[in-house]
Amino acid sequence: MATVKDLLKEKYTQVWYVTPSSTVLDALKLMAEQKIGAVLVVEAGKIVGIFSERDFARKAADGTASLQTPVNDLMVKAVYYVTPEQSVESCMALMTAKRFRHLPVLDGDKLVGVISIGDVVKQLMLEKDMTIQSLEDYIWVHMI
Amino acid sequence: MATVKNLLKIKGTDVWSVPVTATLRETLKLMAEKNIGAVLVMDGDKIAGIFSERDYARNAARHESLLLDNLVSEFMTRAVYYVSPKQTVEECMALMTSKHIRHLPVLDDDQKLVGLISIGDVVKQVLEEKETTIQGLENYILGRGYSG
């Protein structure tokens, strides 16, 4: 079964981040340029939060955000993360339970990537298809 | 293989929408209240577009404004892909993946809006089906093994 490390290997894993004092506008511009739905918020090499399109839409709706607001005020501070050794299935379970679309990957203290729900789903589909294929092959060879 | 109709039976046929005359403030409030990522924009009983959190984030960045008093019709995505209740869930998955979209309205033969499915619903269903197939194949192998 594939691990987070395998997922990171398959794609170029540049991690995009802003700092807590960056403005909401800075973060949104970075997200638009890089075509991503969320950015990590990093301070002194440590992840302190994550900021997504959803966080922005929600805070704009209730009137608590302006584009000049520091990201610090709008980000989600409880960031869940995974390690390179974890299975892709465990990431899926975490994302589903917490309703996240992104998970940072930490190797010890070091941020080594971010995986998205799209990457995770793609991998799980592939694995299940391979399992189905090998079971069918087994049946053809041994049972028919 | 499950169809869109089967999926709607499980998840319900509620569709949240705003009229083309709604402001972004009204639209975002509805999305927050219902905890949804996108709403349909309706012109009477016709779909005029779809508006998502992404549309909002991108437009706010481009215009450097929260745009709350602007009309949703200015920023919605007008090219709306849709599916029919008879289509398979796998077809929806393929369409969503190739077009990079997370939501698909469901229109019946009379072009009447009967539901909205999201990528989450579709993925869950497709994964469950694959799992069922695996179980079935394993049972077949085991069953034959024991009886033989």
Image: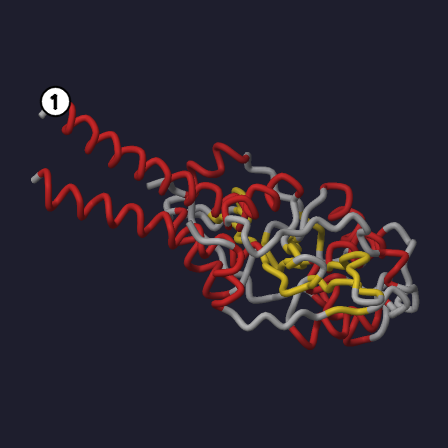
**Which quadrant of the view contains residue A73?**
bottom right
Q: Nearer the viewer, residue B69 or B96?
A: B96
- Up the image or down, B146 lies above or below B3; here it is above
Q: How many marks?
A: 1
Instruction: Tell which residue pokes out farthest to the top in this image.
Output: B147
Q: Quadrant of residue A51?
A: bottom right
Q: Which amino acid, by three-letter code, is at mark 1? A: Ser
Is residue B116 in view?
no
The picture places residue A129, in percent across and down from the top left corner, at 33, 50
Res. A104 in view: yes
Relative to B118, say whether B5 is above or below. Answer: above
Front residue of this view, candidates B148 and A98: B148
Seen in the image, is A112 located left or right of residue A86?
A: right
* Relative vertical location of residue A133 with respect to residue B62 in this rendering, above or below: above
Q: Nearer the viewer, residue A34 or A91?
A: A91
Residue at 55% across / 60% down in the picture? B101
Left or right: where does residue A95 sit relative to residue B57?
left
